[in-house]
Image: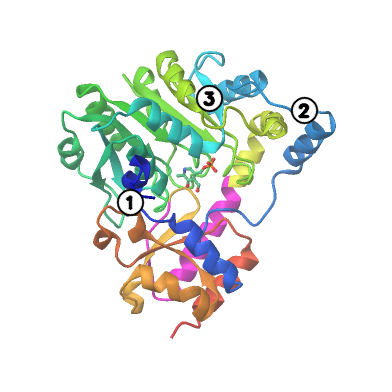
Amino acid sequence: MSRTPHLTARLQGLGTTIFTEMSQLAMAHDAVNLGQGFPDFDAPPAVADAAVAAIREGHNQYAPGTGLPSLRAAVAVHQRRFHGLDFDPDTEVTVTAGATEAMCATLQALLDTGDEVVLFEPFYDAYRAGARMAGATERVVTLRPPDFSFAAADLEAAVTPRTRLVVLNTPHNPTGKVFTRTELEAVARVCVDHDLVAVTDEVYGHLVYDGEHVALAGLPGMRERTVTISSAAKTFSVTGWKIGWVCAPPALTDAVRAAKQWMTFTNGTPFQHAIVVALGLPEEFFAELRAGYRARRDRLHAGLHALGFAAFPAAGAYYVTADVRPAGHDDDMAFCRMLPGEVGVAAVPCSAFYTDPARGRGLVRFAFCKTDALIDEGLTRLGRLA
Ligand SMILES: Cc1ncc(COP(=O)(O)O)c(C=O)c1O
């Protein structure tokens, strides 16, 4: 090819998503995969049964491009039930191919060439790639250990006349941070003062062990300027189903739909039917989910600490981030590339989630969306490190 297409040029240097690289290494070495964030246990039986029933009942053709009406209604009811937010299912809710498509469509819809987007780093790597695809560039606010908080002044300083969006992920991947109400109020203030749109990724919203999940859209002045994204993947242990959704006021929804229709148009009809059932599960399901994950969080955190890693507290999501330098490993990337072959464990190097990898040096993400037996096996193997 004699010329470099725009998109290739914009994605230059971002490489392959780190999850692919680490999962390939895990497979090559038959490693315990504490890297990529997918559970090694199944969907709730009622939800799996609903998907099978939908297939058997013949719900196998294209769903409407905006999503099944019953799923859009279920998302709206769920938002009211858990966050006290009201969305019109017809004009303010859109079903997508996971939160990933929701985010990509939103970024393509709302960003232009030369625009800027504010990201909190470490960031889930799809945000930067999505912004770059739209021709925009990122400005970052660095979350600093041990609690991964940020200075309000840093946020203010990241905003320029070119800024259009602030992307916020809470509960946060990779750190397990849950943004506090005070922090979210600071974000809201900046968005309102500078007339910015906020895009929130709340895929771990049900996985909070300390504190509470606060939806940014519920804060004063934010309902009309927030695109709220979530998905079924993490809550219902169905990462392979790729059913997500976007909730936003009508004008923003129209813009997102205009982009989304040319991406996948629609997806996963039987799975959409099943997620209607999932979103309606009783309170006990969500409470048990949290309790199970809290216990796994404690297990992994204590185990990593006992091995000499500086494991940071994780209030939510399903990851513990640890600094491996106190245990004698300088470089997280080299550590994670060595780990599968050396002791049969996969983890994710956090420097991949920083614009300047030096800021994340030594930080490694371990996932606890795994059975106790697998977590224990992973810890035992890590104990064999020289
Ligand atoms: C923060 C965050 N957003 C989005 C996703 C992907 O969500 P989905 O599978 O619904 O596309 C992940 C998966 O790891 C994630 O961690």
Which is in the foreground here, disc 2 or disc 1?
1
User: Badge 3 is on which residue?
Assistant: 261
Cβ–Cβ under 8 Å for marks 3 and 1: no
Q: Quadrant of residue 277?
A: top right
Q: Which residue was labeled with disc 1?
A: 12
- On whether residue 312 falls in the magenta region, the answer is yes
Labels 3 and 1: the sequence-earlier one = 1
Image quadrant containing the C terminus: bottom left
* Mark 2 to mark 3 CA distance (whole Å): 20 Å
Comes first in the chain, label 2 or label 3: 2
**73 to the left or right of 225:** right
The residues colored magenta run 290-314
Q: Nearer the viewer, residue 122 or 149?
A: 122
- Provide the secondary structure element on which disc 2 rests: loop
Asked if marks 2 and 1 touch (Cβ < 8 Å), the reply is: no
Q: Which residue is mark 2?
A: 59
Decide whether the magenta segment is chiefly helix, strand or loop. Answer: helix
> Residue 70's x, y, as percent?
67, 20
Give the x, y percent position of residue 252.
Answer: 40, 19
Observer-nearest residue: 83 or 348? 348
Q: Quadrant of residue 127?
A: top left
Q: Residues within 10 Å of mark 1 (few under 14, many from 20)?
A: few
Amino acid type for the residue under numbered disc 3: Gln
Q: Position of residue 285 (x, y in %)?
A: 66, 40
Quadrant in the picture for residue 365: bottom left
Instruction: Say if mark 2 contacts mark 3, CB within 8 Å.
Output: no
